[in-house]
Image (cartoon, helix red, strand yellow):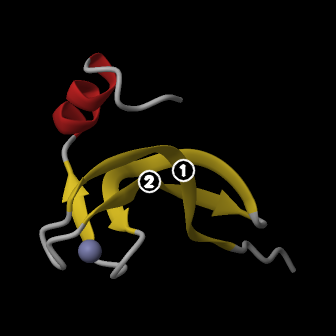
Amino acid sequence: MMLLIFGFRPFFTALATVVFVCNFCGQNVAQQVFKQTNRFTLFFIPLFSTSTKYYVECSNCGGTTELTREQVDNMERRGLAQR
Ligand SMILES: [Zn+2]
């Protein structure tokens, strides 16, 4: 009998740290920029990405805000973020 095990798994990558005033706590603190990629897995091996999301997490209060690809590009263009 052949058993197929498949699923989806999120992968997190820390892209950069930027400092700005947090929307949640109002403090000017470091915000970690993350990339979240959901991957299709077969027998626990990730095969391909199904979706990618970007967001920042506040180091003070832990509040997260979703970013668009454009916002991440803008941050990189302004030299605030490093890969
Ligand atoms: Zn905050």
Q: Is residue 74 above or below residue 16?
A: above
Crowd tier of the residue under label 2, counting other residues whose Cα lies within 10 Å: few below 14, some 14–19, many 20 or above: many
Q: Nearer the viewer, residue 64 or 30?
A: 30
Please give the name of the residue rendered at 58% of the width and 59% of the height, measured from the top-left corner: 11
Q: Give the residue at x 68% y 53%.
A: 46
Instruction: Give me the C-alpha separation between circle 1 and circle 2.
Output: 5 Å
How packed is label 1: few (under 14 Cα within 10 Å), some, or many (20 or more)? some
Q: Amino acid at mark 2?
A: Phe
Q: Secondary structure at mark 1?
A: strand
Picture coordinates of residue 66 (x, y %)?
Answer: 22, 60
**Is there a contact, CB below 8 Å, between mark 1 and mark 2?**
yes
Residue for badge 1:
14
Quadrant housing the N terminus: bottom right
Q: Quadrant of the rendered structure where residue 12 is? A: bottom right
**Which residue is farthest right?**
1
Query: Quadrant of residue 9 in the image?
Result: bottom right
Identified by mark 1, the residue type is Ala
Given residues 1 and 54, the one toward you in this image is: 54
At numbered mark 2, what does the secondary structure look like: helix, strand or loop? strand
Q: Earlier in the sequence, mark 1 or mark 2?
A: 1
* Residue 5 x/y as whole percent: 72, 74
Looking at this view, is 75 or 73 the one in front? 75
Q: Which mark is residue 34?
A: 2
Q: Which residue is located at x 26 percent, y 26 percent?
A: 73
Q: Is 27 left, or right, of 30 in this rendering?
A: left
Write down which quadrant ligand 1 falls in: bottom left
Report x, y in % for residue 10: 53, 65
Q: Which percent across, then down, holds residue 77? A: 28, 17
Q: Nearer the viewer, residue 44 or 73?
A: 73
